[in-house]
Image: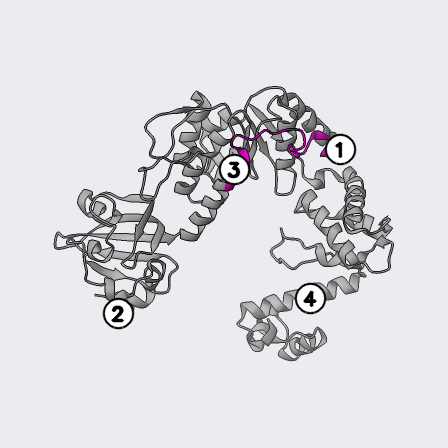
Amino acid sequence: MRTQEKVIANNLDKILDNINEGIHVVNELGQTIIYNEKMSELEGMDKEIVMHKKIDKVFPSLNEENSTLLLTLKNKEIIKNNQQEYLNKFGHKIITINTTMPLYLENGSIWALEIARDITETKKLYNKIISLQEKLYTDKDLNEEDNKYFTFSDIKGKNKKLKQVISYARQAARTDSSILIVGDTGTGKELFAQSIHSGSRRQNKPFIAQNCAALPENLLEGILFGTRKGGFTGAVNRKGLFEQANGGTLLLDEINSMSKALQAKLLRVLQEGLVRPVGGKEDIEVDVRIIATSNKSPVDSIREGKLREDLYYRLAVVLLHLPLLSERQDDIFLLSEYFIDRINRKFNRNIKGLSDEVKEIFYNYEWPGNVRQLEHVIEGAINIISDDNYIKKEHVKPFLIDVSSNNTTQQIDDKKTLPEKMEKMEKEYIIEALKKNGKNITSTAKYLGIKRQSLQYRMNKYNIDTSEI
């Protein structure tokens, strides 16, 4: 065995105990051989209790039919992203997402390795959410008072690109075709989705939104399609979002984050109008309009293997591309006035508008967070204004962070003279050079092509302290 391999072997326990996933390995008899700290933590079991014991002796609710480790030993097949619910020796319920695989040893033995993530609290939270949704949408009359969704009149702007998208969306609202809305974060995808629902024949039926990136595949499948008792350990009869949204609209946010396997099941719903709950044996007919959103180009998502091409064509019967705020510069001041008026009423303030200096800053800023960022910047500024009637530069500067830059704390620059800008660039370049050379002043001076004394002079001039880099 090479030296490096010996080091790894001798430190295996330390390596396994410092990763964020639970690791459980059993031998061909189902006895635990490896059990790391994270697994011990998520299962609430001391390592000494589990090691060298058979799984079914330590976890009474597990057997050869429902234990992913024992099933892998038996079938010699990988089980990926499987939700498992079971009890530990003390009766405590554990819910994990597991990937389990067979290990083939040189002597011909087969062991099983399991990598687990704890989702117990996540599952509890989403069970509460689903229960609340059931209460909200089951047997409920949605009258005009209840229907508080956005409408097209809530979309503010006179920009030509925006008005064209609104026109397409208004026309699409008259049909039941699936819609794919593509736009960067903060461009108003849900605003458009709700407006389409409000302008459709489904306006008095449920509008339900689900973020596809927020949950593991197994949980999301149960939430979308529902569950039936016996489908898996701890499963109950529960309606999914498709059933709850029956007659209305279901918004699937960040569709490109949904697994390919789940996308295939969604495609079947779109094609046939039928859903089958997890653990169910019969299909259920549903009448739901699907609006999906993506913050990435669908073409890029297809190329990267994140989005099925056949699902894309089913979803993008109507395709809406929302413009960036930087493409709608003519709407920046209109939106600013709208947000100032709304926030004035919310906080009982009397801010009259933007100063000329702020108008210039707003017009030239890139707005990586789009309309949502503009709203938050104005609300933040109004929160810190004391006696001024206008939003000034000092009120907005703390909030205009360029999140698209490699330097996440980069803010808008003051109006500097050329010498000031050159000094700023020189300081940044020296700091980067110090980082690359391990903060060694002699090496950094050589790297920069200047004398050590010259570098020290500049470091003193710019107050550069290596301990703070």
For residue 269, the mark is: none
Q: Which residues are magenta?
A: 132-158
Going by the picture, which residue comes out furthest to the bottom? 453
- Tag 2: residue type? Asn
- Tag 3: residue type? Lys
Label 4 near label 1: C-beta < 8 Å?
no
For residue 426, the mark is: 4
The Cα atoms of the two marked residues, 1 and 2, are separated by 65 Å
The Cα atoms of the two marked residues, 3 and 4, are separated by 62 Å
Colour mapping used in the image? one colour
Residue beneath label 3, please? 135
Q: Which numbered disc, 3 or 1, marks the residue closer to the eye?
A: 3
- Tag 1: residue type? Asn
Q: Is residue 327 left or right of residue 87?
A: right
For residue 159, the mark is: 1
Mark closest to the chain's N terminus, 2 or 4? 2
Q: Helix, strand or loop at disc 1? A: loop
The Cα atoms of the two marked residues, 1 and 4, are separated by 41 Å
Q: Quadrant of the C terminus?
A: bottom right
The location of residue 262, given as percent across then percent down, is: 41, 35
Q: Helix, strand or loop at disc 4? A: helix
Q: Nearer the viewer, residue 174 or 205?
A: 205
Q: Helix, strand or loop at disc 3? A: helix
Mark closest to the chain's N terminus, 2 or 3? 2
